[in-house]
Amino acid sequence: MSILITAANSAQAYQLKSILAPEADILLGDYLEIPDLLVKSGKMIRTPKPEGNAFIHEMLALCLDKGIHQLFALRRAELLPLAEARQLFAEFDITLYIPAREIITADVARGIDGRIVVIENGRLLAGHIEDYADDSALPGWGDIGVFKTNNQEYTLFTAD
Protein backbone atom coordinates (compact mmCIF):
# COMPACT_ATOMS: atom_id res chain seq x y z
CA MET A 1 0.00 0.00 0.00
CA SER A 2 1.50 3.33 -1.07
CA ILE A 3 0.89 6.84 0.17
CA LEU A 4 1.14 9.98 -1.98
CA ILE A 5 1.87 13.36 -0.42
CA THR A 6 1.64 16.31 -2.79
CA ALA A 7 3.63 19.57 -2.60
CA ALA A 8 6.84 17.53 -2.81
CA ASN A 9 9.11 20.54 -3.03
CA SER A 10 7.81 22.03 0.23
CA ALA A 11 8.95 21.62 3.81
CA GLN A 12 5.36 20.75 4.77
CA ALA A 13 5.44 17.55 2.69
CA TYR A 14 8.51 16.37 4.60
CA GLN A 15 6.97 17.38 7.93
CA LEU A 16 3.89 15.30 7.19
CA LYS A 17 6.00 12.40 5.96
CA SER A 18 7.90 12.40 9.26
CA ILE A 19 4.76 11.86 11.38
CA LEU A 20 3.33 9.05 9.24
CA ALA A 21 4.33 5.44 9.82
CA PRO A 22 8.08 5.04 9.16
CA GLU A 23 7.57 1.70 7.42
CA ALA A 24 5.04 3.16 4.98
CA ASP A 25 5.82 3.34 1.27
CA ILE A 26 5.54 7.12 0.76
CA LEU A 27 5.83 8.89 -2.58
CA LEU A 28 6.17 12.64 -2.87
CA GLY A 29 4.66 14.38 -5.89
CA ASP A 30 4.05 17.87 -7.19
CA TYR A 31 2.69 19.67 -10.22
CA LEU A 32 5.18 22.49 -9.67
CA GLU A 33 8.77 22.19 -10.87
CA ILE A 34 10.58 19.07 -9.67
CA PRO A 35 14.18 18.33 -10.66
CA ASP A 36 14.32 15.67 -13.40
CA LEU A 37 16.98 13.78 -11.44
CA LEU A 38 14.55 13.17 -8.55
CA VAL A 39 11.77 12.09 -10.93
CA LYS A 40 14.06 9.70 -12.83
CA SER A 41 15.35 8.23 -9.57
CA GLY A 42 11.78 7.47 -8.49
CA LYS A 43 12.03 9.59 -5.35
CA MET A 44 9.37 12.00 -6.61
CA ILE A 45 6.62 11.97 -9.20
CA ARG A 46 4.89 14.64 -11.24
CA THR A 47 1.23 15.11 -10.49
CA PRO A 48 -1.43 16.71 -12.72
CA LYS A 49 -2.14 20.43 -12.53
CA PRO A 50 -5.35 21.12 -10.58
CA GLU A 51 -6.40 23.87 -12.99
CA GLY A 52 -7.06 21.41 -15.81
CA ASN A 53 -10.50 19.99 -16.61
CA ALA A 54 -9.10 16.47 -16.47
CA PHE A 55 -7.36 16.91 -13.09
CA ILE A 56 -9.51 14.41 -11.19
CA HIS A 57 -9.27 11.71 -13.85
CA GLU A 58 -5.52 12.24 -14.26
CA MET A 59 -4.98 12.09 -10.49
CA LEU A 60 -7.10 8.94 -10.22
CA ALA A 61 -5.16 7.32 -13.08
CA LEU A 62 -1.87 8.27 -11.41
CA CYS A 63 -3.00 6.73 -8.11
CA LEU A 64 -4.09 3.53 -9.82
CA ASP A 65 -0.88 3.28 -11.87
CA LYS A 66 1.33 3.81 -8.80
CA GLY A 67 -0.72 1.67 -6.40
CA ILE A 68 -1.62 4.65 -4.21
CA HIS A 69 -4.21 3.89 -1.53
CA GLN A 70 -3.87 7.06 0.55
CA LEU A 71 -3.59 10.61 -0.82
CA PHE A 72 -2.56 13.64 1.23
CA ALA A 73 -2.97 16.79 -0.87
CA LEU A 74 -1.12 19.79 0.55
CA ARG A 75 -1.70 22.40 -2.16
CA ARG A 76 -4.84 24.52 -1.64
CA ALA A 77 -5.68 24.38 -5.36
CA GLU A 78 -5.99 20.59 -5.10
CA LEU A 79 -8.28 20.47 -2.07
CA LEU A 80 -11.73 21.43 -3.39
CA PRO A 81 -11.63 19.40 -6.61
CA LEU A 82 -10.45 16.33 -4.71
CA ALA A 83 -12.96 16.82 -1.88
CA GLU A 84 -15.75 16.85 -4.46
CA ALA A 85 -14.41 13.64 -6.04
CA ARG A 86 -14.06 11.72 -2.76
CA GLN A 87 -16.70 9.13 -3.71
CA LEU A 88 -15.00 8.36 -7.04
CA PHE A 89 -11.67 7.68 -5.30
CA ALA A 90 -13.41 5.63 -2.60
CA GLU A 91 -14.81 3.34 -5.29
CA PHE A 92 -11.19 2.41 -6.06
CA ASP A 93 -10.24 2.04 -2.36
CA ILE A 94 -8.24 5.26 -2.32
CA THR A 95 -8.61 7.34 0.85
CA LEU A 96 -8.34 11.11 0.42
CA TYR A 97 -7.07 12.82 3.57
CA ILE A 98 -8.90 15.99 2.69
CA PRO A 99 -11.67 17.52 4.80
CA ALA A 100 -15.19 18.19 3.63
CA ARG A 101 -15.84 21.13 1.31
CA GLU A 102 -17.41 23.14 4.16
CA ILE A 103 -14.23 22.96 6.24
CA ILE A 104 -12.02 23.86 3.28
CA THR A 105 -14.08 26.91 2.29
CA ALA A 106 -14.49 28.11 5.89
CA ASP A 107 -10.81 27.72 6.79
CA VAL A 108 -8.73 30.84 6.97
CA ALA A 109 -4.98 30.46 7.44
CA ARG A 110 -4.59 31.67 11.00
CA GLY A 111 -0.85 31.36 11.35
CA ILE A 112 -1.17 28.81 14.11
CA ASP A 113 2.17 27.69 15.44
CA GLY A 114 1.69 24.12 16.52
CA ARG A 115 1.85 20.44 15.67
CA ILE A 116 0.67 18.57 12.61
CA VAL A 117 -2.08 16.01 13.15
CA VAL A 118 -3.89 13.62 10.84
CA ILE A 119 -7.56 12.94 11.56
CA GLU A 120 -9.46 9.95 10.18
CA ASN A 121 -13.09 9.16 11.04
CA GLY A 122 -13.01 12.00 13.56
CA ARG A 123 -10.12 10.41 15.51
CA LEU A 124 -6.40 11.11 15.76
CA LEU A 125 -4.49 8.91 13.29
CA ALA A 126 -1.03 10.52 13.47
CA GLY A 127 0.54 13.31 15.47
CA HIS A 128 -0.16 14.39 19.04
CA ILE A 129 -2.76 16.51 20.81
CA GLU A 130 -2.24 17.17 24.51
CA ASP A 131 -4.95 15.91 26.86
CA TYR A 132 -6.51 13.83 24.08
CA ALA A 133 -7.94 10.45 25.01
CA ASP A 134 -7.21 7.98 22.20
CA ASP A 135 -10.76 6.66 22.12
CA SER A 136 -12.56 10.01 21.97
CA ALA A 137 -13.70 11.84 18.87
CA LEU A 138 -12.53 15.35 18.08
CA PRO A 139 -15.71 17.43 17.78
CA GLY A 140 -15.73 20.11 15.10
CA TRP A 141 -12.66 18.81 13.28
CA GLY A 142 -14.57 16.98 10.61
CA ASP A 143 -14.11 13.38 9.65
CA ILE A 144 -10.75 13.45 7.90
CA GLY A 145 -7.83 15.74 7.05
CA VAL A 146 -4.42 17.10 7.95
CA PHE A 147 -4.41 19.99 10.39
CA LYS A 148 -2.05 22.14 12.41
CA THR A 149 -3.05 22.67 16.04
CA ASN A 150 -1.93 24.39 19.22
CA ASN A 151 -4.50 22.32 21.19
CA GLN A 152 -6.99 25.21 21.45
CA GLU A 153 -7.57 25.89 17.76
CA TYR A 154 -6.67 24.36 14.44
CA THR A 155 -6.32 25.17 10.75
CA LEU A 156 -5.78 23.17 7.60
CA PHE A 157 -2.19 22.11 7.10
CA THR A 158 -1.15 23.09 3.58
CA ALA A 159 2.03 24.07 1.75
CA ASP A 160 0.61 27.38 0.53
Image: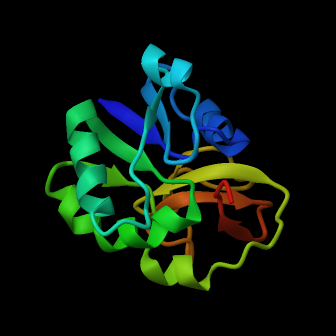
From what the image shows, is residue 81 above or below residue 59? below
Q: In which quarter of the image is the N terminus?
A: top left
Q: Is residue 19 visible?
A: yes
Residue 37 position within the rendered picture, expressed as x and y whole percent measured from the top left: 54, 18
Q: In the shown orientation, is residue 149 left or right of residue 21?
A: right
From what the image shows, is residue 20 above or below residue 153? above
Q: Can residue 99 be seen in this view?
A: no
Q: Residue at x 30, y 37 (%)?
A: 68
Q: In the shown orientation, is residue 101 left or right of residue 113?
A: left
Residue 10 position within the rendered picture, expressed as x and y whole percent measured from the top left: 68, 42
Q: Residue at x 68, y 44 (%)?
A: 12
Q: Residue at x 64, y 78 (%)?
A: 107
Q: Residue at x 22, y 67 (%)?
A: 87
The foreground one among 108 and 130 is 108
Image coloring type? rainbow
Residue 137 position within the rendered picture, expressed as x and y whole percent measured from the top left: 51, 65
The foreground one among 29 and 117 is 29
Number of marks: 0
Q: Quadrant of the C terminus?
A: bottom right
Residue 5 position within the rendered picture, expressed as x and y whole percent measured from the top left: 49, 42
The foreground one among 93 and 59 is 59
Outermost residue to the left: 91
From what the image shows, is residue 128 above or below residue 110? above
Query: Picture quarter containing residue 17?
Result: top right
